[in-house]
Image (cartoon, rainbow, N blue to C red):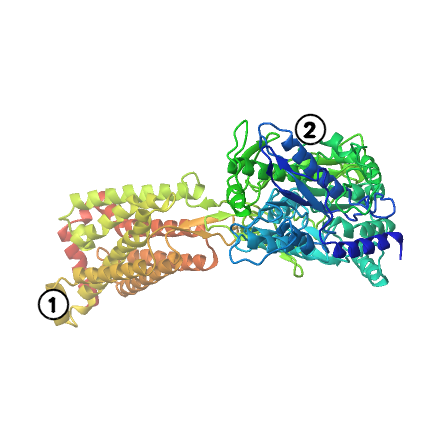
Amino acid sequence: MGPQARTLRLLFLLLHALPKPVELIENSDFHLAGDYLLGGLFTLHANVKSVSHLSYLQVPKCNEFTMKVLGYNLMQAMRFAVEEINNCSSLLPGVLLGYEMVDVCYLSNNVQPVLYFLAQDDDFLPILKDYSQYRPHVVAIIGPDNSESAITVSNLLSYFLIPQVTYSAISDKLRDKRRFPGMLRTVPSATHHIEAMVQLMVHFQWNWIVVLVSDDDYGRENGHLLSQRMANASDICIAFQEVLPLPEPSQVMTSQEQSHLDNILDKLQRTTARVVVVFSPELSLHNFFLEVVRWNFTGYVWIASESWAIDPVLHNFTELRHTGTFLGVTIQRVSIPGFSQFRVRQGKPENPMQNKTNLRGTCNQDCDACLNTTESFNNILMLSGERVVFSVYSAVYAVAHTLHRLLRCNRVRCTKTVIYPWQLLNEIWDVNFTLLGNQLFFDRQGDMPMLLDVIQWQWDLSQNPFQSIASYSPTEKRLIYVSNVSWHTPNNTVPVSMCSKSCQPGQMKKPVGLHPCCFECLDCPPGTYLNRSADEFNCLSCPDSMWSYKNDITCFNRRQAFLEWHEVSTIVVAILAGLGFFSTLAILFIFWRHFQTPMVRSAGGPMCFLMLVPLLLAFGMVPVYVGPPTVFSCFCRQAFFTVCFSICLSCITVRSFQIVCVFKMARRLPSAYGLWMRYHGPYVFVALITAVKVALVAANMLATTINPIGRTDPDDPNIMILSCHPNYRTGLLFNTSMDLLLSVLGFSFAYMGKELPTNYNEAKFITLSMTFSFTSSISLCTFMSVHDGVLVTVMDLLVTVLNFMAIGLGYFGPKCYMILFYPERNTSAYFNSMIQGYTMKKS
């Protein structure tokens, strides 16, 4: 067993043999002005690694590895605050504060000091029914510095409602005021520390990290909080999480601990993660980082929790600079004027340490070895900005300001009133004061919303060894500023710690394994886009009116395809429609001027106008096919044109049938012919065909819609074909089929009357018109079954115009020609001679 282990064992036995904890007192008596006594108002659990610096013990001389420098530094911070308050005339005038301090030995010495503080001056703790009038040895406790010890202490103090202000225990459990009603702290909770770490990793795009935690409540709780934060955000993944062995106080590892540590380092060396987050007390990290240096780790980013972020002993291990970049989260940097000189001042020569058995003798302040150690680290402690020291300093001042209010102090004196701990606890929640330019108060959870600093370790002592690179605001919950970082990498580049490289714009992530940070990059196909802010793992489909190319991050409007005026096909059809309109108008005028002539009456008489008026209107409505479709244009295309065309075909069909009846069937079926003429059979037939066609068109429009819609061009998805409804082609085919039927009937009847007299022989013209209509309709149906898009609209319009022209010019053109150029044949005598000649020939 080494000398250090013997020292710790001796100390442990002494502490259990003593009736009281060791006191660290400058003055044995604490008297107030007016002979008012306040005994031990404050106590600080100054977490020193070993109390071998107590001068009355026969122990080896302390050195930098047997004493926790920060613990001793914090102890001196409380002494400095108490002395400063006692020397201040405006705060607690006439009142002197006293203190007693003990070492909690990290975890092992918690209950005994608490019982001592709860006891009265006679060292007894009575069992009472009501403790509201009970006066323990102290009225407030500052510390301890770690969460496990703070929880143990608070479980006892809460029953007595004694205020406990901790300066670095950040566990979220302490926010439960039902369980810990007397717990307050001058630092933000662990949630804010972890959020600062996460936002730092997000800022540098580190999404693949390793988490190492100590084998105690501190490590496990913070590791769990970090894992929860990762699960909720899913922007950072943990490659693996391991538990670091917690060594004995001697810092000598067992073979089992050495093997476990080797396994962790081997796993760390094989992973692709280069960012390591470490939640552990600094006592557990000395052996770990010795092994890290021995394994020759380089290029890593080590993110330190607040427990070791500004530890000077670890920083003094300068070989760590070769392992990578050290970042940490700690309390904000606030310098305390005069503290650095106070920390290393020499003890008073009038207090010799001759009687080493005097348990009430002063110590620590006069320990030369401890002062020497402090002096060796003084430069680092001073340049670090006294970060955690300010938390202790502000905790003392928080209680002092509360006492100032309870004692109703003015500028001269305070009232002589007994202060009970529960009174102090009730009042401290409302304390609000300014200290060294910082506004200090406690929130609803009992925390001071102090700023957090993200620091980087520097090994050039001419600079700040713990240089601030960013600040985190607990109230705003975000990093306020991130400055340049000196990366220990070639060319000072930011280390990359990603399971998978970032995808290119327009590439979605396909998860690989269980971690969302591990993925493959797949191109988004045309017609989809990737919105990283909404979903990085799925390509979103573009709206119907928009399109995108491969790997697009946005959609663009499709090029709308419709029949436009500047196109050659539109111009050609428009010219034909114009010719048809004016020729029909001319025919209508000629037939109106020669309405009583035999030529017009033989062509159908009034029924000619029933054909010519729809033809004229149809030619005039051709422009509705041009331009983007609207509800009106869709109605005209689907209803008006097809009904007009059907009226014309039905008139021609009934005209062909009537010619056959007059010359061939009148003699054979006189009664049927009589009924046909008596009830105006031609008009009834036209009306019936029109009604059927209107019913079919209405049914088709009700089954679909007349609202214009867009359809993707199958040959080019970048083009959107604007049409009237999705079943436009189906409806067009259906209407064309009915027109085909009428054309076939008209052709058949006309063919039966091919031997009629010349003046009555309209069959060949009707046959020609119906043949053209039949052929064009078949061609249109064939074209529509093969092609799609604007060409269908063009062909539909072209066939419609040509059919109308075939009817107008093919049926009425020859008659106009006879009326205009052969007027002698447009007489009743001429027509009678032709009929007599045909009758004599048949006889």
Residue drawn at the location 59% of the way across and 57% of the way down: 126
Label 1 SS: helix
Query: Would you identify the image quadrant in which residue 384 lies?
Result: top right
Query: Would you identify the image quadrant in which residue 42 lies?
Result: top right
The x, y position of residue 653, in whole percent, is 25, 61
The x, y position of residue 392, in whole percent, is 66, 40
Residue drawn at the location 33% of the way across and 43% of the way down: 623
Q: Nearer the viewer, residue 483 or 361?
A: 361
Q: In this rendering, would 405 be left or right of 608? A: right
Q: In this rendering, would 781 be left or right of 9? A: left
Where does label 1 land, which residue? 674
Estimate how packed mark 1 is, as few (under 14), some (14 to 19) or many (20 or more) residues with alpha carbons within 10 Å.
Answer: few
The x, y position of residue 176, in whole percent, is 55, 53
Kindly identify which numbered label has been placed on residue 691: none
Where does label 2 land, which residue? 337
Kind of residue at badge 2: Pro
Residue closest to the far left: 678
